[in-house]
Amino acid sequence: MDMGNGYGNEQDMMEEGEYGDEMDQYEMDEEGQMMEMQNGHMMDEMGDEYGEEDDDFMRIANDPQFAHMPPIDRMHKIRRNILQTINDMRQRIESPSPLFNVDPMVVKAANEYAGYLLTGAEDEDKLDEICQNYHVVGKVIPLVGFAVLEEDEDHQGTIQEQLMDAHGLLLELEYELKVLADPKNSHIGIGFAMDRHQVKVVELVSSKAIKIDYV
């Protein structure tokens, strides 16, 4: 992707299909799926919040003609929304920055690191290990947002809202905002994890001279 292209091209890449090549880029591997495996109840809630769109996903997932396709990433919508808020911010600043490209392998690394952070502290060595496992190209800058879930579910927002709140925290912090706005940073991978007590949003930012495609 040309770094000078508008957000429409990035949006097209994110939405060009709800299965097939695009889903192949964003599917989680067996370790990256820990959020769904450990929190099936919470993922069901997420599905309920998606409404008709999620119903369409389930029809596709259960259709035998698509059985050979990779699993559908039910987090693609919230990931797309977060990416849009970041790219909108990069365009609003005094000297607009090029729009972020999505690095699909960094997405997988971000998912796994977010899962690790549910029980562990931020650890640069652990992040490096995860990135090496996914053959991530170049050094990444980790930005971690979180939201604490209330015990009283009646006073708690939806999971989507909690994830957006966790991301929004990063836009209020000077260092994190500077990293996201820096025109030298060109690629990003956004990952999520949650349990019954908290949600984590991990945004791994990097600088690359070219777009990274994986075959």
Image (spheres, grey):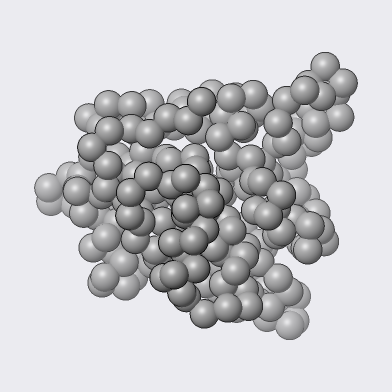
Callout count: 0
Residue 114 picture quarter: bottom right
Could you say where residue 159 lies in the image, as x and y percent from the top left? 66, 62
Along the horizontal axis of the image, is 89 left or right of 126? left
Along the horizontal axis of the image, is 57 left or right of 125? right
Residue 58 at least partly seen: yes
- Which residue occupies 71% across, 59% down? 34
- Which residue occupies 77% across, 23% down? 68
Could you say where residue 117 lies in the image, as x and y percent from the top left? 57, 72
- Which residue occupies 31% across, 66% down? 176
Along the horizontal axis of the image, is 3 left or right of 127? left
Reply above or below: 148 against 182: below
Reply above or below: 109 against 65: below
Quarter of the figure that contains the N terminus: top left
- Which residue occupies 60% across, 69% down? 116
Could you say where residue 158 lies in the image, as x and y percent from the top left? 67, 63
Residue 191 at least partly seen: no
Residue 76 picture quarter: top right
